[in-house]
Image: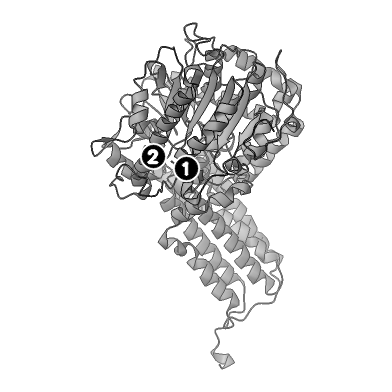
Amino acid sequence: MNKNNKMKMNTFMPVFLVAVAMLWAKTYITQKTQFTLGVEGTLQEFLLAINPLGSALLLLSFSLFFKGTRKYWALLIIYLGMSILLYANVVYYRFFSDFITLPTLFQTQNFGDLGGSVLTLIQPLDFLFFVDVVLLGALVISKRMEKDMRTVKKRMALPLIAAALLISFFNLSLAESDRPDLLTRGFDRAYIVKYLGMYNYALYDTVESAKASSQRVMADSDDNTEVLNYTKSNYAKPNEAYFGAAEGMNVVYLHLESFQTFLMDYELDGEEVTPFLNSMMDDPNTLYFDNFFHQTAQGKTSDAEFMLENSLFGLPKGSAFITKGQNTYQSAPAILKDQGYTSAVFHGNNGTFWNRSEIYKAFGYDHFFDIESYPNTTAADMAEYGLMDKPFFEQSAPILESLPEPFYTKFITVAHHFPYKMDQQLATIEKGTTGDASVDNYFQTARYADEAIKQFFEQLEASGLADNTMIVMYGDHYGISDNHNEAMSEVLSKDITPVENAKLQRVPLFIHVPGMEGGINHTYGGQIDLLPTVMHLLGVETQKYVHFGTDLLSEEHEELVMFRNGDYVSPGAYSIGETFYDPETGLPLEGEQELEQAETLKQHGTYELQLSDGVVNGDLLRFYTPKGFTPIDPSDYYYQSSTDINE
């Protein structure tokens, strides 16, 4: 081709400015359409529009410092990296309704088990997220464009960087005017993205993660003073009618994966979805809590376990199971070890998932039976996240029966897990008909799990263990995220308002104790409250321990349930985002006294979250050993694959 016919472009800057414009537009459109950020008013709309500009301009400006053709490639690589970060957050948000944090990127041992779930979240039109990358790449490699080999002069580069910083500071100033102390008060990542944008959020998250990591190094025993003063003053003494009701009994936790309370008594086309669990609500020896909420964040299942074992909140970012596996804990297995209990976890998945094979040692679990302990498993027995619930319980029965009594055990089920797929030959109820696959499939796997739980109860009865065993069944986290609220409004025949969405965070809690008076309990509580509740039922006092939850059965229990994003629910008020709501009417609170009381609760709950984070990030329990408690040395524990516990 004649050189004269070539399109000549002898400067780098037009390509650079095109890249900035494309990334700005793509990020704004993505933030506007793919995330639910609660944008309200002209100012917030304006902030959402401009917040990608400053960060896009600043980050792409790093390419200006490369020489020759390398600056073109640097521009493309930075652009690609920012595009991947943006798209990764879109996919992550589709299930978790949350944004990726730095600690979640280090949860790599879980990635191998997530393949099917991730593929379910990818949509056909997602290739559009990278059309602009291809266009930019075509410009960079095009031979029709004459590359500018000159170094970009400082007098051109520095004003661009200065402009990027000026835009970012202007953005931050406006954001602070609309939400004061944005970067110091909030736990909610959605606010950071809404006000500052995806890329500034990533920078903020990196700084906050580094600060959290440094807390352990800087911590000392004096940091425990405030924590101990708070937990002792917050202690709720046991209810005499229930204290010791299960004393000396075995303990079995049944971890109900992805179960939400709306399933209880729910009928699909006139058929009960969970008939066995429904029957347990009427069992004379079972307490059922209908206002029990999950309080998990990015750690999901591991957060639920972390809270029930320690009465410490999970972290606002990532999973304590992953990042705090080497901490000192005073967990339920360790507390009960001093009472003569043998402890074990049963889970039909890989032991490395959520770092369980390591952190369980820090908790003081004597045994951990993972998928390697189920040698008779066939391919037909496997779900996406491990052994299906029915063969899981069936194969676990002889191991459970061989444990020395009394025992403290936990069974982690997996069949009722996103994306809720199952062999239709195993299904005993039809799918839903909303057109949303996650919601429609949800009912079939819930029914299967319900049948498996009934099977477990029958096994326990046949073994002779039922009369001396307390069974605690709890939902670990939501199964249907608020990204599916349109389908859920059809399922529930009501609009999913902010208050209704908060109520959807309720998960079942059943506590079955032979000989104990049961019934339906309307107390507000969360997973943080499970440990002191169970300990008091076993007749074990908890006042000397650092627990941020309180006994659900105590008359002194404070009915305040904090969520990791700083929202809360209570009988008198729901705090959701910037607004306090009446839980009965679903309308915003208006009375001055009511608003003042609601704000006081929020401040109290936020303080509690901060103290708990201080304990976990600072590893403060290493400086405090309660009287009579035997500290755990994780090196004393080694989990073998064999099911022979005497080996």
367 or 71: nearer the viewer: 367
- Residue at 47% x, 7% y is 241
**Residue 362 versus residue 122 in the image, above or below:** above
Examine the image and state in which quarter residue 595 appears: top left
Mark 1–mark 2 Cα distance, whole angstroms, equals: 9 Å
Give neighbour class at mark 2: few <14, some 14-19, many 20+ (Cα, 10 Å): many
Q: How many marks?
A: 2
| Quadrant of the frame with the N terminus | bottom right
Q: Which mark is residue 448?
A: 2
Find residue 569 and report its horizontal and vertical position in percent. Answer: 43, 26
Mark 1 — residue?
388
Residue 207 in sight here? yes
Name the amino acid, label 1.
Answer: Met
Q: Are marks 1 and 2 in contact (CB under 8 Å)?
A: yes
Q: Residue at x 57, y 44 (%)?
A: 375
Q: Amino acid at mark 2?
A: Tyr
Lower sequence index among marks 1 and 2: 1
